[in-house]
Image (tube, rainbow, N blue to C red):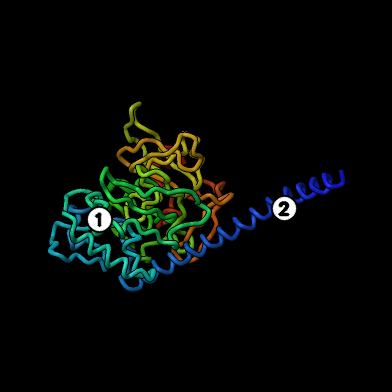
Amino acid sequence: MELLVVIAIIGVLVALLLPAVQAAREAARRAQCTNHVRQLGIALHNYHDVHKQLPAPGYRWGQQASSHAGPGERLGGGWTGGSSLASSWLVSTLPFMEQGPLSDAFWAGVRELPTYRDWYRLRDATPDHVLAPVLRTQLAVLRCPSDIGVKEGFVPRSGSAPIARANYACNTGNTTPFSSGEQAEASTRGPFVLNFPRGHARGVNFAEITGGTSNTVLTAEIVAAERSGDTRGAWAYASGVFINGGTKTGISGSSGPRPNHLIPPNGNALDDNLMDRPANCQAAPDDRWLRCAGAFEYPYQTARSKHPGGVNVGLADGSVVFISSTIELRVWLRMLSNTGQLPRRAVADGFL
């Protein structure tokens, strides 16, 4: 009996201690994620110091001429005028994260891919292509240890080399980053611009962030998808590592025009109104982080993390803050805008 009592007491003590141990471990993981966000902020500031603007969030293959490509991108190997590259902002930032050899290997591999008048074409890199080892590279600085689990690489199409995952994304504004009409309004744009002027992607100069660099989101955490058919977190794929505030009014769906669909950080994905719509979606229906609606004309996705209560966000001044999941939507949308304003159409429609 005495032995049973001792065992019972030990069991109770372990049960009381376990949550504290788990909380301590999560605190350490969150601190590591915070450090990663800070390192990315330093790398982006160094990029800006050299090129006088941030890197573009991604590049089109054919519609963006060499004269519009981001500074520092090497358009060699016979590419001229109408041919440009497929990449993400993370690819552009590699040399500033002490990953110069990986950057060189990426561009050497891209030179062997054909050019197209299409978006983000890494899908012609087969598993035995020279670019495949680069795309499969998993950089520790791009992963948050709180987002554990098996993460299959994103496969752009059957037969393509998988692209490894990341947990950090750039801010492309508070509404639809893929619509040049929406992006024509300064209040909707973020530090990374995907489609303005029409057909061109670019990163802004910090002087364009008139709402204040200490108030504007530069980067944020995302939860990486676990299945090969979902783009979210694909580090070298432009539509895999961005966040925005949602989508605009009037996009047609099967049941007619959709209303404004704007999402706070860590929006509960089990709520049909707070799901992501990534460019490619393959998530489980009961996944409270990554449940997603089918892709349509204008993808959108919000900041997400597996930290209790919020997400780590890198601001344009280089600082890192923890944003609560309960932040007021109006405040969050202002933080995603270079001007610190709400999206005008959402206000005009009475949505905000």
Whether 271 is drawn above or below 191: the answer is: above
Instruction: Say which of 87 and 164 sits in front.
Output: 164
Instruction: Say which of 231 and 145 sits in front.
Output: 145
Q: Position of residue 96 (x, y in %)?
A: 36, 70
Q: Quadrant of residue 283?
A: top left
The structure residue drawn at horizontal position 32% and vertical position 37%, both measured from the top left corner, is 296
Nearer the N terminus, badge 1 or badge 2?
2
Asked if one can make out residue 90 in the rendered structure from this viewpoint, the answer is yes
Instruction: Say which of 188 and 111 sits in front.
Output: 111
Q: Which mark is residue 56?
A: none
What kind of element bears circle 2? helix
Q: Is residue 79 left or right of residue 128?
A: left
CA gap between label 1 and label 2 equals 50 Å
The structure residue drawn at horizontal position 25% and vertical position 45%, both measured from the top left corner, is 159
Q: Is residue 311 left or right of residue 182?
A: right
What kind of element bears circle 1? loop
Q: Amino acid at mark 2?
A: Leu
Kindly identify which residue carries mark 1. Answer: 86
- In the displayed image of the protein, which residue is found farthest to the top? 255
Q: Position of residue 183 (x, y in %)?
A: 32, 50
Marks 1/2 in contact by CB < 8 Å: the verdict is no
Q: Position of residue 57 (x, y in %)?
A: 32, 57
- In the displayed image of the protein, which residue is found farthest to the right? 2
Asked if one can make out residue 172 in the rendered structure from this viewpoint, the answer is no
Residue count near mark 1 (Cα–Cα under 10 Å), binned few <14, some 14–19, many ≥20: many
How many numbered marks does the figure carry?
A: 2
Q: Which part of the image, by quadrant, shows the N terminus?
A: top right
Q: Position of residue 61 (x, y in %)?
A: 20, 53
Q: Amino acid at mark 1?
A: Ala
Q: Quadrant of residue 300?
A: top left
Kindly identify which residue carries mark 2. Answer: 17
